[in-house]
Image: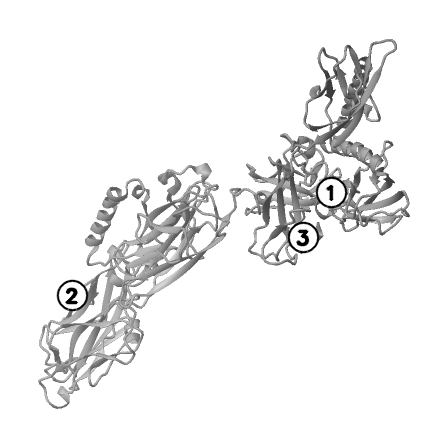
Amino acid sequence: MCCWIMMGNDTKPRTKDCSWFAFYLALPLLFGNQALAQIRYSIPEEVREGTVVGNVAKDLGVEIPSLIARRFRVVSGSKDAIFEVNQDNGALYVNKHIDREELCQGGGACLMELKILVESPLEIHYVIVEITDVNDHSPSFPEREQIFEIAEHTLPGKRFQLHTARDPDAGVNSIRTYTLTSNEHFEVDIRQSDEDKIPFLVLKKSLDREQKNKHTLLVTAVDGGKPPKSGTLNVSIIVLDSNDNRPMFSQEIYHISIPENVALGTSIFKMNATDPDEGTNSDIEYSLGKILKRKIYDMFELDKLTGDITVRGNVDYEENNVYKLDVEASDKGTPPLTGECRVVIKILDVNDNTPEIEVTSLADTVSEDSKPGTIISLISVTDKDSGVNGKIISSITSDVPFELKPSYKENTYSVVTKGLLDREQVSHYEITIKATDCGEPPLSTFKTLNIQISDVNDNRPLFNETPLEFYLVENNIAGNAIFSVSATDNDLNDNSAISYSIVRQGSQNDIMSFLNINSETGDISALKSFDFETLKTFQFQVVATDSGAPSLSSNVTVHVFILDQNDNAPVILYPVSSNGSAEGMEEIPRNVNAGHLVTKVRAYDADIGYNGWLLFSLQEVTAHSLFGLDRYTGQIRTLRSFTETDEAEHKLLILVKDNGNVSLSATATVVVKLVEPREAFAAADVKSASKDDEDNNVTFYLMITLGSVSTLFLISIIVLIAMQCSKSTDCTSKYLQETNYDGTLCHSIQYRSGDKRYMLVGPRMSIGSTIVPGSHANTLVLPDRRGTSTEFQVVATDSGTPSLSSNVTVHVFILDQNDNAPVILYPVSSNGSAEGVEEIPRNEVTAHSLFGLDRYTGQIRTLRSFTETDEAEHKLLILVKDNGTCPCQQQLLWLFNLWSPERLCCC
């Protein structure tokens, strides 16, 4: 039973009652409504089990229907509780037999303090039950008979202490008086000592041993009950011969103090009595009174000869703080005389009891979103020591977000949260509560509370990186997983269960329609095969959502870079025949020297990097000693001068292949025809014009358009020449700038004759020159030309009958101007800009600086090995310019990405 028992003494009942009255009067002032919850009941002892003490629920204002739900109960620390509450009606009833004398020893009020606990919300109320006494015990003497030896010369008035009767009842039911059977020599006198009434046998008339040597009396102890109860003591008086002085103590009551836990055998006091008689009548022996409680004989021992009082039992202040010893000193006279005194031993408290911590209520699980100040437990601390030794200081020693808050009742505390909780940081707390008293030295006790923090959905899923970058080799298998995303959530159970989805909106929704994601694993699969040449990069967003309520989510941007594979064979740009095959014919004069540029094979590979790096080689050639091929530029040059014995036509088979792991190739056939110098010069003009047209007109459709325009222009010139012709015998040479505009006056032919007609004749009439008649001069107009030179004849014919004519040969040499900027063939990005990305392994073996550029071939090579400190990406800006008077130039941007060899191989 968890209760407190408070006792008072018969000698100070008013003081105790006044103290309780003052205590209950102060409660409302100190604690307001909480103190009003303390109720006091009164019930007599020995009532039957089940007797109702009072309806505590009604008195506390707790609703009867909620008693079971709120676990309305008496908090008990023992298995056999004296009082219990009925949760059906709220009545406080007797659960066990009540014996006031067993619970409260003494004559003061017997009070029991009960703790009534109500949950949801948690409330604690204190109820005091006073156990009133009933007269259920009769007075009793420690012995049935007491014998006195009294000298016959004893004077009247002599007092002899009788055995004191004991009655466990208190108050009016305790012993009230003693009576003695009627006789002429003795009477009973009662002395009040503290709470006890001590009877004395008083001699009222001298004894005469010769008349009667023994008297038998009956002493009766009567209590104050209704009806009264009594007990008897047989007293035998033996009359002795004279020994007229009894031992005497220096004082009637001695007060001494000893600390508790004093060592056994320790002498604590020495009794000293004196007797004026001589001989055996003055020899004194000491003894303890026979009316003392049995425990006193177990605690202390009196040496009958020396009078030393020694400790023979364990002295504990908490069990009893005061012991009263009645000591008798008897001489050896006949009859022996006895002197009495009382030794009051006060036990001093020593700090020998550690505080005790009792957990009244404990919630072992706390939600991590609990607000500061949430109550998780109620505790109370007690110390059996008194005074300063019983003062307790309580605290939480562990570094936890909890604190103790004192209750209105002393040494009662609430354990509350003092800060915000986060299960993801700390999921379990061990709260160590320390209770230390104020004794010297202080004693402490510890109590550990284990608290689990329950999870709430307060963490979003997080991706390890943001944004995410993945590299995907082109030509992936449609339907297979291409990569996977993963997010983590620090919460538990459903709060950490993550599902993935793709945000299907925005400008790249058409790309995302080909992507699918596994909502559980985050595996992303592609429903189509990607082509690097069509699509080099794209991005989308993935959302990770947990299963909490409400759910939380986060997203990440995924950048996908398509890596090139060598899946495109080289494409021959030149030569190309009219039927589309890679075949062409080149005419060169026989008299060219070694190193003469025959032609340049041009090819293109849609791949990039090594996959798009083309190398040229001669597979088949009529005479190996005649022609050489530059493996990097595709230029075909003569290796020596031609002789008369060399064949007039040579067939060259050119192999163009890339540098992929599995290289792809294409072939071109060039037929070189040797012609005489004059024919070769004309053919060279046509060839140069064709090459220049090809350089400036990259696309096939533009070539068709220019060809159509040239054809129409040529027809117009022929018509004009047919209309206007003139004769001339002189050969005129003129040099024209190649950038003359169509229709620009390039030369004027003048004659001193009458009306004349001019007509262009000769092998170069196809150039589209035009003769414009004029009154004084005939003007030669040339269309736009891209060749190096041309010649034609002008015929001048008069209008006579018959007409006469003459002609003149005109040599026109086209002079080059710097009117064409360089055109970047590689790299070229998907949007047409001269930009490219190359990936190279970090362990490429090179020299001292990073990159070098061959100024003639345009090859970029590494100059030293890469280290871990080098940047992963390098930007190179390449300037391509010609050597004109006013140079034209073109810039291209090249990015180099460095990867570890392992990753490059994986791609």
**Is residue 82 depicted above or below 331 in this figure?**
above
Q: Is residue 639 left or right of residue 129?
A: right
* Tag of residue 903: 3
In this rendered view, identify the residue nearer to me: 861 or 42: 861
Q: Amino acid at mark 3?
A: Arg
Circle 1 — which element?
loop
Give the percent coordinates (x, y) of residue 17. Answer: 22, 51
**Is tag 1's residue or tag 3's residue first in the polypeptide sequence?**
1
Give the percent coordinates (x, y) of residue 388. Answer: 25, 62
| In the image, farthest residue toward the front | 752
**Is residue 789 depicted above or below 332 in this figure?**
above
Residue occupied by mark 1: 607
Quadrant assignment, res 159: bottom left
Quadrant assignment, res 277: bottom left
Q: Nearer the viewer, mark 2 or mark 1?
A: 1
**Is tag 2's residue or tag 1's residue first in the polypeptide sequence?**
2
In this rendered view, identify the residue nearer to me: 828 or 125: 828
Distance CA(mark 2)–CA(mark 3): 111 Å
Q: Amino acid at mark 2?
A: Arg
**Is tag 2's residue or tag 3's residue first in the polypeptide sequence?**
2
Residue occupied by mark 2: 191
Distance CA(mark 2)–CA(mark 1): 128 Å
Circle 2 — which element?
strand
Few, some or many residues within 10 Å of mark 2 (<14, 14–19, 20+): few
